[in-house]
Amino acid sequence: MPPLRSWFNIPRGSHFSLANIPFGIISTPSSKTPRVAVAIGDHALDLEVFAANNGFSALSTIQPHQAVFSQASLNDFAALGRPIHSVVRKYIQSIFVQDTPYPEVLQTNAALQKQALFPLKEIKTHLPFRIGDYTDFFAGMNHAYTCGVLFRGPTTALQPNYKHLPVGYHGRASSVVVSGTPIRRPNGQILQNPSAERKVPVFSPCKKLDIELELGAFVCKSNPQGEPVPIGEAEESLFGVVLMNDWSARDIQAWEYVPLGPFNAKNFGTSISAWVVLAEALEPFKTKAMENDEQVLPYLQEKEEKSVYDIKLQVDLKTRSGASSTMTKTNAKNLVWSFPQMLAHHTITGCPMQPGDLLGSGTISGTTSSEMGSLLEQSENGKISVKLSGGEERKFLEDGDEVRISGVCGSDEEALVGFGECVGRIEPAHELKL
Amino acid sequence: MPPLRSWFNIPRGSHFSLANIPFGIISTPSSKTPRVAVAIGDHALDLEVFAANNGFSALSTIQPHQAVFSQASLNDFAALGRPIHSVVRKYIQSIFVQDTPYPEVLQTNAALQKQALFPLKEIKTHLPFRIGDYTDFFAGMNHAYTCGVLFRGPTTALQPNYKHLPVGYHGRASSVVVSGTPIRRPNGQILQNPSAERKVPVFSPCKKLDIELELGAFVCKSNPQGEPVPIGEAEESLFGVVLMNDWSARDIQAWEYVPLGPFNAKNFGTSISAWVVLAEALEPFKTKAMENDEQVLPYLQEKEEKSVYDIKLQVDLKTRSGASSTMTKTNAKNLVWSFPQMLAHHTITGCPMQPGDLLGSGTISGTTSSEMGSLLEQSENGKISVKLSGGEERKFLEDGDEVRISGVCGSDEEALVGFGECVGRIEPAHELKL
Ligand SMILES: [Ca+2]
Ligand SMILES: [Ca+2]
Ligand SMILES: [Mg+2]
Ligand SMILES: [Mg+2]
Ligand code: NI
């Protein structure tokens, strides 16, 4: 399929080509109330203004629901369901396509262009969803294996349950922030000498602050408590996907996590990209997941072979010196469980989902150091230094480090389906007077 | 202090004496919209109706905020802060006290009594808060020890971190339900023979369904991300307390929990009592926590010696046969960490709290079998049977079992500060066609 051409100037190489149409929440200098927008090229189309000015005049199905575009989150739009997301996306594509059947809506409507189209540089993006619950999985099998080798050695690297179920834990929804939000280094309890017989922690700023390169998927459909979402219907519950950085305090985690799992090591901040790429836009980039040599139980068996996404992922680290280095290049297909499998497992107990719930994939890593999505893996838990450009090196993050995750599907520079970026910069820990 | 007497008929032995004044969310047959109420004796006072009819005419501080009583949750009322909760409680006490200075407000206002006072039997109670995040701790040291002995033996029963920090995990906020809501037995993955070399799970209804007797505390104050709540200010962030039953699937947990903690074993349902007892009402019942023989770090050190509550707790189990047995009698002082300590620890990383967040205490147990707050402990993980009245016995819960937790402070039958009850009945697992 040749790329859709637009009458609107979409720069070559833009993540937000006509093939994409991702949704987000914006505010502008002249209107600080957050509302719904789509990204197109290097602009945002304000859907509240667009709707209020008859932008949807040729799409009757959305007209009774236009109030969703004035909301400060995508929750209400998402709750309309996948068929509506699809018609809205396709309609916006039809508005921007070169031979649009509706030129009067925007192409020849200079007034509305001026009112509703904003350069991305001039707007502020906000957290796209009001997140009710956030769950983080562990589906990056290379990451799970590499970490298992570090902590337990190669023979028991993967736990016995790993290939039978998508291991996950409930995360802290209130700590999820939009790309660009600074992340403060947490304080906490750390065991300085884990091999000492008497284990007495000290209070300290985290010394092993790390990233986790992940995808996040947003839920768009609720299920009643007690009623699982069957695997065959799970796709319909998924709104779209963002990049995610699950900032992690490795030293806090090592001390606290027995026996109930990671807690304070994870709840100081998780960053997500601002523009949610609809599941429909990602459909052409579906690919096979990592091979699972165990037979999974029927409730986790998918009909389609292609269940994860072929997304090129990259992590760049810019230090206080201003020098930037590419730390990681990998691909989102390095997952052994798909989002539909995660959702089917999560709800098999009857756990109720709601629109706006966030599922994290788990850290996405390849097998070589430069493909690994965490410093824990690359530095072998602080044993070796990771070389950066300009002669600097890192075992874990230092204050002032800025981490930039980007992700993109496709190679046709005029038809990319990309995520933009997910950025966060480390602020020094508070010195606490206690 | 002699008990406050009321002109209103408050039955002897009522949990909701004038010394209490707990808050909740109700609806009535004639008005289905949930709104705020307090419980008083065996009635609820509808605060929306009370406010609309000049009930607060003698309390000018609340007048600008009266809209909070028309909300479907206590979030907005809680967010007003502890000083406001206190004046509202004391004002309502002053309305009901025998020599009320404001008889015209309610005592001699038969019309408003008719409109605003409803027998508890005739109303429906709803989840008191819109819960943004729910965290469950593990502060019942007897429970932690007994479970540790079961799984690891007595020498390593408590993990090295246990006395240094309040161990906890993030729970599933969407699964918290109000007392009376049925709980469906979850399906999931179970390892039938944990000692087999090749570990292959089966799909099954949970066979080790259990309760956990807990308290829950609601947060009323937010802290900005990155900014901890100091231990000395944590009390101001706590709205009040409920009874909690953290239903648990022990067999699902045993297989899934490595290495990220309990997940599906906990997310199918957690029940809480409907009436939230204000922290202020519990203040006279503060007592010393269990002794911690470790020196805790300064950020967890409390000024006051009395930091937990002397609450008599009881669990009754009624089987399908209709016979009811008291399964547990214990006291809420069996905690080694207080709610302020939990909050200070939770936020030491900068984790942001919001009004409506729920903190679970962890299972509260004494040291003898009839004082233990879970069947896991009483049955030694299914090794011995717990005798019920009428000749029945249990290792874990069966379908149709109804579990009733109750809790009360004080012994003066005219001045009890009680929680009412937290009830749930087990429905059979779904037979899933997969
Ligand atoms: Ca993670
Ligand atoms: Ca618990
Ligand atoms: Mg995180
Ligand atoms: Mg639970
Ligand atoms: Ni500060």
Image (cartoon, coloured by chain):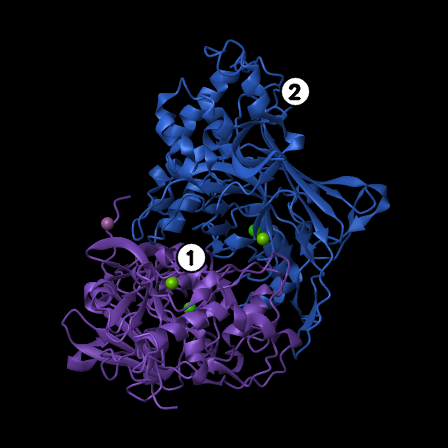
Chain colours: A purple, B blue
Judged left or right of residue B164, residue A271 is left
Instruction: Tell me the chain of label 1.
Output: A
Task: Determine the residue positioned at 26% across, 71% down.
Answer: A403
Figure quadrant of the N terminus of chain A: bottom left
- Count of marks overlaid on the render: 2
A303, above or below B146, in the image: below
Residues packed near mark 1 inside 10 Å, few (<14), some (14 to 19) or many (20 plus): many
Q: Nearer the viewer, residue A217 or B110?
A: B110
| Residue B432 image point, x, y percent | 70, 68
Three-letter code, disc 2: Pro
Residue A289 in the image: state x and y as whole percent: 50, 84
- Counting from the top left corner in percent of width and height, residue A190 is at 36, 59
Seen in the picture, residue B426 relative to A99 is either above or below; the reply is: above
> Which residue bears the numbered disc 1?
A173
Residue at (58% x, 73% y) in the render: A165
- Looking at mark 1, is its residue's CB closer than 8 Å to ligand 3? no
User: Dot 2: what SS?
Assistant: loop
| Picture quarter with the C terminus of chain A | top left
> What residue type is disc 1 on?
Ala
Q: Residue at x 61, y 58 (%)?
A: B153
> Which of B396 and B44 lies nearest the eye of the viewer?
B44
Q: In this view, does A427 lie to the left or right of A80?
A: left
